[in-house]
Image: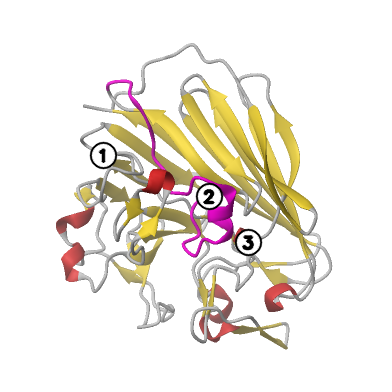
Amino acid sequence: MAKIPVLLCFTIVVLGLVNVSTAHKQVGIYELKNGNFSVKFTNWGATITSLLVPDKYGKLADVVLGYDSVKGYMNDTSYFGSIVGRVANRIGGAQFTLNGIHYKLVANEGKNMLHGGTRGFSDVVWKVSKYHNEGQTPRIVFTYRSHDGEEGFPGDLRVSVAYALLGCNELSVTMKARALNKATPVNLAQHTYWNLGGHNSGDILSNDVQIFGSHITPVDSQLIPTGKIVPVKGTPYDFLKPHTVGSRIKQLPKGYDINYALDGGMVHHKMKRAAVVHEKRSGRVMELLTNAPGVQFYTGNMLKDTKGKGGFIYKPHAALCLETQGFPDSVNHPNFPSQIVTPGKSYKHYMLFKFSTKS
């Protein structure tokens, strides 16, 4: 794997406030840039709105799906680029029992909860608490205070998400949370839709994907985990060696939307490889590392004529998501790694995206 040619990295950080406000809070667009590697964000949902990275010829492209304006994200139903929580993915029956107390949550996908409810962390204004524009590691930190009872979850929760550029080709994501007064489930995820050929380049079916997970957590017809953890060997879910996304996707009803139990994933403090994606036409490669026990592989199955940047229409399989996470519905499956955070304890979730090119 050949890395992106070494460039003279310099830092330019631009803050652009847009004329949008909600509950008297201002929503902005922010940029971090090192050389020709740049990422833009909005504090609506602590969202990644664009990421520009060169291909093997040095040509830049925006490789994340999204919208031209903040208002697009405010009306979004696909969770483009956002931080989802308090609990990402699904909670069966929108309910769970913790310490003898039964909690009924806000259902927003049939009888189940998806990505934190009708107004999860993707649909709130985050505070920009740090924004550094000097040095070789430009960074931005978003914070949010989630109150007791929000979407049905117990306890007050202080949350932060830090994005940082490491050199000219790495994006670090650090998600932290602290329970302030009650035990509560916490499972944050970064929900960017990736198309390494460019957001407007078509589908991702020809992308080579490798996922470092020997097992998955199978789901029922409502995409709720059954509680089993089964091997991928001999199934269309086996990406232990690189395969194109489209090579076996027709064996599935709509496409991939499944949690992988990452190999070595029970050690929460240890970073390990989660996945590698290679887009052959551009030569772009994205490697993902994390300390989370699982990763949701999703192939944009539910995208349907979504009008995105520049008026481009996103269709099914226009991108893929690799959402590192705790196992879905872990609050209802004692055999899954616990996502319960108790007062005085911290939740820490790390992701590292490494971009490079190869012929």
Q: Which residues are magenta?
A: 57-83
Q: CA distance from mark 3 to mark 2?
A: 26 Å
Helix, strand or loop for the magenta stretch, by majority: loop
Is disc 2 in contact with disc 1, using a CB cutoff of under 8 Å?
no
Mark 1 to mark 3 CA distance (whole Å):
31 Å
Percent position of residue 82, x then y: 55, 54
On the image, the x and y values in percent for residue 203 come to 25, 51
Image quadrant occupied by the C terminus: top left
Spot occupied by residue 171 in the image (x, y as percentages of width and height): 52, 35
Q: How many numbered discs? A: 3
Residue at 48% across, 49% down: 67
Q: For the residues marked 2 and 1, what is the alpha-carbon distance in whole angstroms?
A: 25 Å
Q: Quadrant of the N terminus?
A: top left
Is 3 on the left-hand or right-hand side of 20?
left
Nearest to the eye among marks 2 and 1: give it. Answer: 1
Which circle's residue, 1 or 3, is located before the other in the chain?
Answer: 3
Q: Quadrant of residue 107?
A: bottom right
In this figure, which residue is indicated by the disc labeled 2? 291
Residue 38 seen in render: yes
Q: Is-magenta flag for residue 58?
A: yes
Foreground: 226 or 220? 220
Q: Residue at x 46, y 56 (%)?
A: 323
Q: Residues within 10 Å of mark 1 (few under 14, many from 20)?
A: many
Q: Tell me if residue 315 comes above or below residue 131 in the rendering.
A: below
Going by the numbered disc 2, the residue's amino acid type is: Asn
- Secondary structure state at the residue bearing disc 2: loop
Q: Which mark is residue 123?
A: 3
Mark 3 is surrounded, within 10 Å at the Cα level, by few (under 14), some (14 to 19) or many (20 or more) other residues, namely many
